[in-house]
Image (cartoon, grey):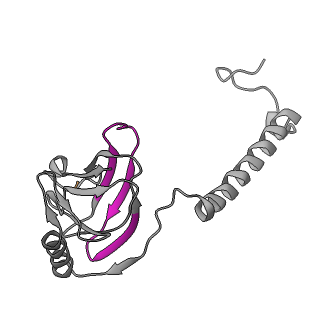
Amino acid sequence: MSSPLHSPQGNWWIAGVSVLEKTWIRISVVWCLLLFASMIVWASYGKQNQAGPTYRVSTAEFMQKVQDFKKAGTQTEDGIIPADEHVYVAAARFSFDGFPVVLEAGKQYQVHMSSYDVQHGLSIRPEHALSKQMSLQLLPDYEWVLPMKFDEPGVYHVVCNEFCGVGHRTMHGSFIVRR
Ligand code: CUA
């Protein structure tokens, strides 16, 4: 009886691989190939992918864009109602600029995002289902434009999900979505 506790007897290394082991190796090779193929298919056709163009932008330029967005929008107690479908938000150590933003449910917006300093995260979580989360990464010098549509009204919390320094945990924002 072979056991990992006892040394195997005889010329065990020249014994052929058993049919059972060969079968499992074949199954795992096929499974690996299937997973590899699904990765390509998923990346090309999956609706989960965050599409949207990215543009080069300087920190000063993007700061100006966020200021213009805040000025053009309507300031309310809950946050800024954008003047049009374009929303500009930025992350910086250690807060977000542009939030809170008040949006209409079911309307498509173009959300322009960037960072003023280092790499930050932007995670969006609906208050009514905190386990659901969309995680994005924001980089300085890049303006990322993502189309976003919130189907359900409610509060969507925004947090930084990339460790960016001592104040990382204080980075909060929100999208307030109304009918
Ligand atoms: Cu910004 Cu963590």
Q: Residue at x 28, y 71 (%)?
A: 84
Left or right of 8, for residue 62: left
Left or right of 7, for residue 110: left
Closer to the camera, 132 or 136?
132
Q: Quadrant of ligand 1?
A: bottom left
Residue 5 x, y percent position in the rendering = 64, 20
> Vertically, is 141 above or below 17?
below
Residue 86 x, y percent position in the rendering = 30, 71
Residue 163 x, y percent position in the rendering = 25, 53
Predominant SS of the magenta segment:
strand
Left or right of 101, for residue 18: right
Q: Residue at x 31, y 75 (%)?
A: 143
> Vertically, is 16 above or below 42?
above
Residue at the extreme top: 1
Residue 34 x, y percent position in the rendering = 72, 52
Q: Residue at x 11, y 52 (%)?
A: 77
Q: Residue at x 15, y 78 (%)?
A: 64
Q: Which residues are magenta?
A: 121-147
